Every structure is written in C-alpha cells, then in structure tokens.
C-alpha cells in the first residue's frame, strides 16, 4: 500500500470510529512513517546535554524501517529480516523450508500476535507501526522480504492500470515511476538480471495500486522445481478487506483506551469510504479525495493543516536541532544535536516503538517454528 492508504485512509478510519484528532494523527503518521524512516544510524554530538548522552550513549542504531529495491545497502541479511520482512512482508510461517516460511501471508500468526499486544497497549504510535505491517500482509501476501526464489515470478500482467504519459512523468519528476516503467518494458529474458527476486520487485508496484487487477505465475513447489501456478489478484478486494479488519482493530483499541474517545464524531458511510479507497485514479487524486472526504464529513477542519498535509519531516524537525532535510535523507547522520525534549518527542517514541515491535516479531516467529537469527529476542 502507499500513502493514500497507509496515512489518509487510516486517518479517516481512525477518526470515523471516534478516536480524537491528535491520537488519530499519531496512529496514521506512524503507519506512513514506516515507509519514510530512512535514517538507520545517528551519531550524537559530544556537546549534547549530559543527561541525554547518559540515557542514549553516543549513537542511535537500527532506526530505519523503510525499504528500497534500489538501495544496495539494504541487500543484507539484517536489513531483509529486521526491516523488510518485519515491517513490509510479515512471514506466514508455512512451508517445509526457510524461504517458504518467510513468504508473507495475510493475517499471519506473527502479525496477529503483535496486533493483540498493540491493542492492549495505550501507545497510538506502536499501534500505527503495527497497522502498517498488518495492512501490508493483505497487499504483499505471496511475496517474501528476503531475496528468494519465492519472489522469482513469471507471466506478470495487468489489465486496468491508468496510463500516464512519459512526458507527464518527467514533468512531475516522478522518478520512481519512470524507473518502474523502464523496467516493465524490459523483456522477461533479462528481467532477473535487472530486477532481483526481492520483495515484490518483479511485479513492480502492482500490489500497492488499490484498484488494479493483475496476475502472475509462481513456483508452488517446496523444492523450487519450476512447477508454476497462476495467481489472479483483485487489489480492490484485498484493500477493502484490510480496512474493514483495521476498523475492528481500531475499535478494540478505543475500547481499551477510552481516554482517546471523541464522542462528537458520527460514523461515516463505508460504501463511500471504500469507493475512495479503491478509486481508479492516480495516488495524488485519491489523496485529494480523502482530504475532501474528511473535511466534508467533519472528521477534520480547515484549521487542521498539520494533519491534512502529511509531511515526513515533522517528527524529525521536532526531535533534532538544526534539522537539514538532505542530511536526514541518508542512512547515516553524524554529529547530531538533540532537541531539549527529545525523550518526549514523537520521533523517539517511534524509535522505541519499532524496537518493541521487532522484539515481538522475532519472538512470535520463533514461537511459530520460524527461527530467524537476530539481536532482539
């Protein structure tokens, strides 16, 4: 899924079940930030307050949760298991060998265990992180977060994707989509040399387009003996089911945490909700529809611009002094000065949340017969 679902649809759903604005914002922001948290290591300047250095040491490690098919630094075992698999392709723990067990499954035992922990916790940021991974088990099912034959597929086709001209993509500087389009035109003969069998890279962005109908062929055998089966996918069904289940999770979280309740909210028309969720439009148009929906239904007001407009730097700006955007686009940031209230910042709570999540992830994997070497359990 993309920002229109991970942030805007989740924000609208959180408000519609009666969660107050700031808490709903934290849930949705944490969910989307899983795709945007690039920085993995931060070294702290020596002249930070002594109490902060005493609490944190001289560096913050393992802070990234986003994954990238183009960043070669993520092509290592630790990134694939503790990041890509944990947050984007939660394993199903089914099959006779490790690669098959790592294959993502909708509502796997691992993610259901973490969801249960999250709804019984009062932390909306932890819930948002968990809901990102939960939603992706619907859209990314069948693929694995490690480089594996599981992801080596054939016969990829779609039949209803919106076509945007190359000129328009260049004009709007949509480089990722340009790269995907170039890759799509490459022949099946050289695909494996260009697109590694990692995540859903070989089916491009198809799993994340909410209206798309598509198909692919995968090796269904345990020993990868090239006996392929066809999988036909209707993303609309997957997205609608995911958000329906997420509604139930949000309601359970609210029942357990009545301090977050906003009784002024009237439940929305979920047929209209699903229509926006799966509209055959480009992502930017769906986002515009979500904004209009939340404003017209009274879920947000025009004064809530900090919520309406998602900015992936907000939490970073709050947590770090002298914030410069280009510095925090890298995997490693050095000599950083922390805000005076850093330990209370949303970014630091997010960092604590992903460590909490990873501990539960590896614990649940082990419990369900999937042993993944790690530094968390």
Image: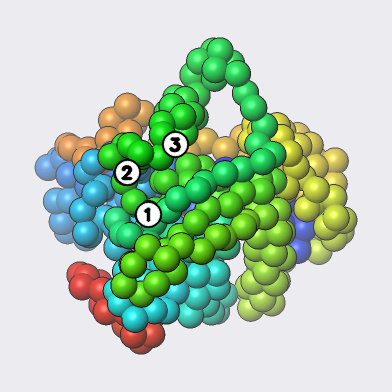
Image quadrant in which you'd find residue 91? bottom left
* Percent coordinates x, y for residue 157 in the rendering: 57, 44
Q: CA distance from mark 3 to mark 2?
A: 35 Å
* Percent coordinates x, y for residue 105 in the rendering: 50, 70
Say whether residue 316 is visible. Answer: no
- Residue in front for this viewpoint, 295 or 219: 219
The circle drawn on residue 313 is: 3
Q: CA distance from mark 1 to mark 2?
A: 8 Å
- Residue in front for this viewpoint, 69 or 22: 69
Residue at disc 3, secondary structure: loop
Q: What residue is pinned by disc 1?
A: 152
Please determine whether, in this image, residue 75 is positioned above or below residue 305.
below
* Percent coordinates x, y for residue 95 in the rendering: 39, 79
Residue at disc 1, secondary structure: loop
Say whether residue 67 is visible. Answer: yes
Neighbor class of circle 1 (other Cα within 10 Å; few <14, some 14-19, many 20+) is many
Q: CA distance from mark 1 to mark 3?
A: 35 Å
In primary-sequence order, the first of circles 1 and 3 is: 1
Residue at disc 2, secondary structure: helix
Marks 2 and 3: in contact by CB < 8 Å? no
196 vs 43, left or right, is right
Marks 2 and 1: in contact by CB < 8 Å? yes
In primary-sequence order, the first of circles 3 and 2 is: 2
Neighbor class of circle 2 (other Cα within 10 Å; few <14, some 14-19, many 20+) is few
Q: What residue is pinned by disc 2?
A: 192
Q: Nearer the viewer, mark 3 or mark 2?
A: 2
Identify the residue shown where x is 22% and y is 70%.
374
């Amino acid at each position: 899924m993309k920002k229109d679902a991970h942030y805007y649809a989740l924000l609208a759903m959180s408000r519609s079940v009666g969660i107050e604005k700031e808490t709903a914002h934290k849930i949705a922001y944490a969910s989307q930030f899983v795709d945007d948290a690039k920085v993995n290591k931060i070294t702290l300047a020596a002249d930070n307050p002594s109490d902060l250095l005493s609490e944190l040491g001289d560096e913050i490690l393992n802070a990234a949760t986003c994954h990238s098919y183009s960043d070669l630094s993520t092509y290592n075992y630790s990134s694939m298991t503790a990041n890509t698999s944990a947050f984007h392709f939660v394993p199903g723990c089914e099959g006779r060998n490790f690669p098959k067990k790592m294959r993502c499954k909708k509502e796997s035992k691992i993610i259901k265990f973490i969801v249960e922990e999250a709804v019984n916790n009062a932390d909306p940021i932890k819930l948002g992180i968990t809901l990102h991974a939960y939603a992706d088990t619907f859209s990314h099912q069948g693929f694995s977060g490690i480089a594996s034959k599981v992801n080596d597929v054939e016969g990829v086709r779609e039949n209803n994707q919106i076509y945007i001209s190359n000129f328009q993509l260049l004009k709007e500087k949509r480089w990722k989509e340009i790269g995907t389009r170039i890759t799509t035109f490459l022949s099946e003969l050289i695909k494996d040399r260009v697109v590694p069998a990692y995540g859903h890279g070989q089916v491009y962005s198809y799993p994340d387009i909410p209206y798309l109908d598509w198909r692919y062929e995968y090796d269904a055998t345990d020993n990868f003996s090239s006996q392929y089966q066809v999988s036909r996918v209707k993303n609309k069904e997957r997205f609608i089911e995911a958000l329906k289940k997420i509604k139930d999770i949000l309601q359970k979280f609210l029942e357990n945490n009545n301090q977050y309740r906003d009784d002024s909210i009237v439940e929305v028309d979920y047929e209209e909700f699903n229509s926006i969720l799966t509209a055959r439009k480009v992502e930017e148009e769906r986002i515009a529809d979500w904004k209009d929906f939340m404003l017209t239904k009274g879920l947000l007001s025009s004064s809530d611009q900090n919520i309406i407009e998602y900015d992936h730097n907000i939490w970073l700006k709050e947590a770090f002094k002298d914030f410069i955007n280009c510095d925090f686009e890298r995997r490693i940031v050095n000599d950083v000065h922390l805000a005076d209230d850093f330990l209370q910042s949303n970014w630091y709570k997010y960092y604590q949340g992903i460590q909490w999540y990873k501990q539960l992830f590896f614990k649940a994997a082990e419990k369900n017969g999937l042993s993944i070497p790690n530094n968390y359990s």
